[in-house]
Image: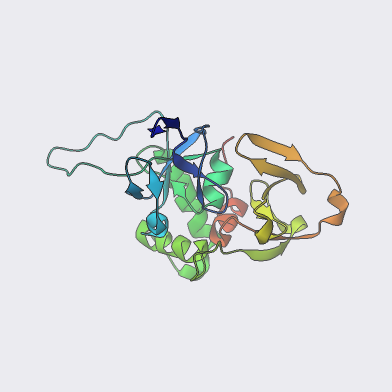
Amino acid sequence: MRYKGILIPAQNRVTPYGEIVSCHEKGLLMGNRGELRVDDQRQLIGLSRWKGPSWLYCSTDKKFTPKPGDKPLKYTPLFFRDEYTALAAGHRPCGYCFPERFEAFVSAWTVGNPEYGYGKYDIKKIDNVLHGERKYSNRSKKTYPEKLANLPDGVIVTLDVASGESYLVQDKALKQWSPLGYVPIHSQNLVTEVLVLTPQSVVNAIRKGFRIEV
């Protein structure tokens, strides 16, 4: 995208904090939170990035085909490094793009979070729970403390929210996240407690068998 003759990457890449930044790399998955742009020419996104509870991650290949009579679907394409990142940011599988992933997620989420009392799932209620886990009232990323040894693989954490850094948990060790991939960090023995970026109900779903695809 060019603005006044200058090539500028669109603001469309989502970090594990749920923030939307500019990046030339597209990512392995696409996301949807609805129409978010406040400046079509420069592709800028405003505070509407937090609006609505239904946050999805979708295929970059499968295109949505509206049914006859449906209104045109308007949304801002977002992109994720991978499924780890999408889940940490508070998105869930799209039932249209990934019907099997969607059913597996809902099943594991329901078993992993019995306190919500869903005999039969209601995806709107699940979305509302996720929305409450994404951010504080000041729109900063909501986290919770946990022992590293207690976390399943696939969760993304941070050691300090102010740093903006994030780490993938694999085999009780940490790999630093970046838009291009993951790098193992040193001094693993010094890390015992972390702040979890992945919403707690999603962590519970992973514990109950939701397998993240790499």
Q: Position of residue 1 (x, y in %)?
A: 40, 32
* Viewer-closest of 168 and 203: 168
Q: Identify the residue shown where x is 71% and y is 44%.
A: 176
Above or below — where is 23 with respect to 187? above
| Residue visible at 38% across and 37% down in the picture | 97
Q: Position of residue 77 (x, y in %)?
A: 39, 40
Most foreground residue, 158 or 131: 158
Q: Is residue 205 above or below residue 78?
A: below
Q: Quadrant of residue 83?
A: top right
Q: Which quarter of the figure has residue 125? A: bottom left
Nearest the camera: 179 or 200? 179
Q: How is the image coloured?
A: rainbow
Residue beneath the point at 58% across and 44% down: 84
**Residue at image point 41% right, 59% down:** 47
Q: Quadrant of the C terminus?
A: top right
Instruction: Look at the picture and state if 131 lies above or below 185.
Output: below
Residue at the far left in the pictured view: 69
Would residue 75 be visible to someone looking at this image? yes
Q: Residue furthest front?
A: 4
The image shows residue 100 at horizontal and vertical percentages of 43, 39
Q: Tell whether 40 sits left or right of 205.
A: left
Left or right, 15 with respect to 189, comes to: left
Front-most of residues 34 and 214: 34
- The x and y percentages for residue 62 are 36, 30
Tally of numbered discs: 0
Res 211 visible: no
On screen, residue 64 above or below 20: above
